[in-house]
Image (cartoon, rainbow, N blue to C red):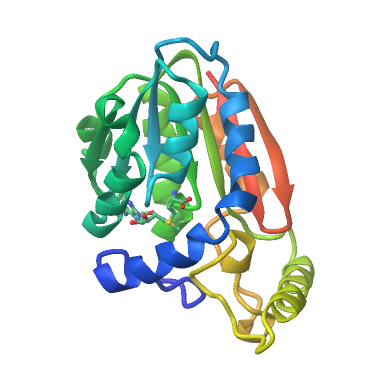
Amino acid sequence: MNSHDRHDWHSAEYVEEWVTRSRQEDDARLARFRLMADLVPHLKDAPITILDVGTGYGPVANVMLEAFPQSRVVAQDYSEPMLAHARRTLASHASRVTFVQADLMSADWVAKAGGPFDAVVSSIAIHNLQSAPRIREIYREVCLAVNDGGCFLNLDLVNAPTPALQRRYWEVMSSRREARSPTGSPSRGGTADLARMPAADAQTDDRPPFPASVDDQLAWLREAGFSQVDCFWKEMGLALVGGYK
Ligand SMILES: C[S@@+](CC[C@H](N)C(=O)[O-])C[C@H]1O[C@@H](n2cnc3c(N)ncnc32)[C@H](O)[C@@H]1O
């Protein structure tokens, strides 16, 4: 596991703390999740099937269920404590949600999730695998599971294009953290998506912190078989990449 990104997603205590901090950022995150919903190329009343990869406590699934009132959502994660949170988050839509416990590192995760899907979405989950080759494979597996005319949208942490820019991102994030918190305490693993980037003082060398840059992601999406591929939104090390099939 990358030292910048330690999580214990199977620990109920860790997950409880992470979800509590993340929920404080739900309003800020909502705009990005709504952009993802707007990018899904289907009418809002279409009876589509959506897969949320690494659903966590279900914030993206929730936005999709509200944006597409006739949709069905498969909420996938390997963490039972996270799925327990997701069941509570999505309780008011329970009849339209299927919860699937599956590990993205295992070959059968898509088969467990079912499909095919009209849209596959994901938020700050896939980088957790810390393996560029596995993520590249997952993009192929996702593409095979997406119906023609469907899409894959992945909001995730990405490497800066150069070490100098990576350092600049961390400096900006550190000063923002200090401005937010009187103690300047780091929020690694918690609060806003961008605050999940490592602190500047955690930077000991020029190794990239995440498995891929935006350019890598776009190349993998094209290679996987998506035809219209782009980075739809980006703020420093957080990017929404995706493709239409
Ligand atoms: C940072 S949380 C994001 C949760 C949610 N998508 C959000 O945006 O709030 C990452 C999620 O990915 C899940 N995850 C990490 N590695 C996984 C794996 N190998 N298989 C399935 N889920 C995984 C974790 O359990 C966790 O719920």
Q: Tell which quarter ligand 1 is in.
A: bottom left
Say which residue appears at 38% left-offset and 45% top-offset. Answer: 55
Image-based side of 45 in relation to 215, left or right: left
Image-based side of 124 in relation to 83, left or right: right
Q: Position of residue 142 (x, y in %)?
A: 40, 31
Q: Quadrant of the image for the N terminus?
A: bottom left
Residue 98 visible here: yes
Front residue (pair 89, 99): 89
Residue 120 picture quarter: top left
Q: Position of residue 195 (x, y in %)?
A: 62, 67
Q: Is residue 50 above or below residue 19?
A: above
Residue 11 visible here: no
Q: Position of residue 235 (x, y in %)?
A: 73, 53
Front residue (pair 47, 39): 47
Total labels: the figure holds 0
Q: Is residue 52 above or below residue 123?
A: above
Q: Is residue 49 above or below residue 31?
A: above
Q: Is residue 120 above or below residue 148?
A: below
Q: Position of residue 6 (x, y in %)?
A: 42, 73
Image-based side of 90 in relation to 28, left or right: left
Say which residue appears at 71% left-offset and 41% top-offset. Answer: 233
